[in-house]
Image: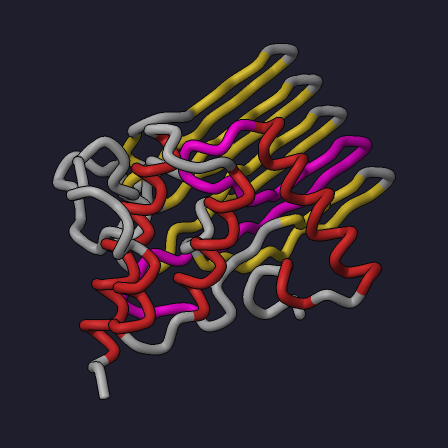
Amino acid sequence: MDSLVALRDRREQVIARISDAYAHDLYDVDELDRRLDLAHAARTVADLDVLVADLAAPTTALVPMTTQAIDDPNRLDRRKMRAIMSALERKGTWVVPRNMQVRAFWGSVELDFREGSLAPGITTLDLRVIMGSVELILPPSLAIDVDVSSIMGSCEERHRAPVEADPARPFLRVTGSVLMGSVEILTRLPGETARDARKREKRERKALRSGDSRALPPGRG
């Protein structure tokens, strides 16, 4: 039987290769989604190897940083981010502070964690949204816990966090409140655009209505 560490490390390597192949147009978003779902559901290294057997040697174009447990010496312990009647974005490669306070007042905030470097253990994100909006974009491998209250607003979760959080990997804890505003938490696959994400979610909703669990991510069938 494969060790949990070997299985975890091989899963990350396979996900990186699958994502890299998609970035080089070797297949479409449907095939990307199918392979990533199988990678997350795999229980042996052999199952994972099958998913990349037809792919060329890997490149370093897409290596997901969000699953790395090596800390960054430049990481801030605490940071405040404010969007007051303005827009604020963090995307691409960035070092995520251990504790973040995000305030959106008549403004919008977008935080894309897909290529972000998170610290091992718990990263805390505290939100205060007043007549504004916050969008959090997660990679499929990032575990998350959400405890956000809403008054005349909304907090919508459309993510596909792992069924079982890995204590050796980053974990995002989101707290706070929304007043007459919105918080949206969603998953996008590595290299996936907003349009591709909408197509995938539409297909998953259709699968839910039809009862076809094969088209759903692990844990939703």
Q: Report whether residue 79 is seen.
A: yes
Question: Residue 15's spot in the image, x, y percent?
Answer: 33, 51
Q: Dividing the image into 4 quarters, which one contains the C terminus?
A: bottom right
Q: Residue at x 20, y 73 (%)?
A: 5
Q: Residue at x 39, y 29 (%)?
A: 25
Asked whether, in this view, residue 198 is left or right of residue 83, the answer is: right
Q: Is residue 137 above or below residue 160?
A: above
Q: Dividing the image into 4 quarters, which one contains the N terminus?
A: bottom left
Q: Is residue 128 above or below residue 122?
A: above
Q: Is residue 48 above or below residue 197?
A: below
Residue 121 falls in image quadrant: bottom left
Question: Residue 149's spot in the image, x, y percent?
Answer: 73, 50
Front one among 123 and 55: 55
Q: Residue at x 31, y 65 (%)?
A: 48
- Farthest front residue in view: 54
Q: Is residue 25 above or below residue 211?
A: above
Residue 168 belongs to magenta span: yes
Q: Residue at x 67, y 49 (%)?
A: 157
Q: Which residues are magenta?
A: 165-193
- Farthest top residue in view: 86
Asked whether, in this view, residue 15 is left or right of residue 132, the answer is: left
Front one among 51 and 193: 51
Front one among 56 and 139: 56
Question: Residue 41's spot in the image, x, y percent?
Answer: 45, 69
Q: Report whether residue 118 is seen.
A: no
- Farthest left residue in view: 73
Residue 113 belongs to magenta span: no
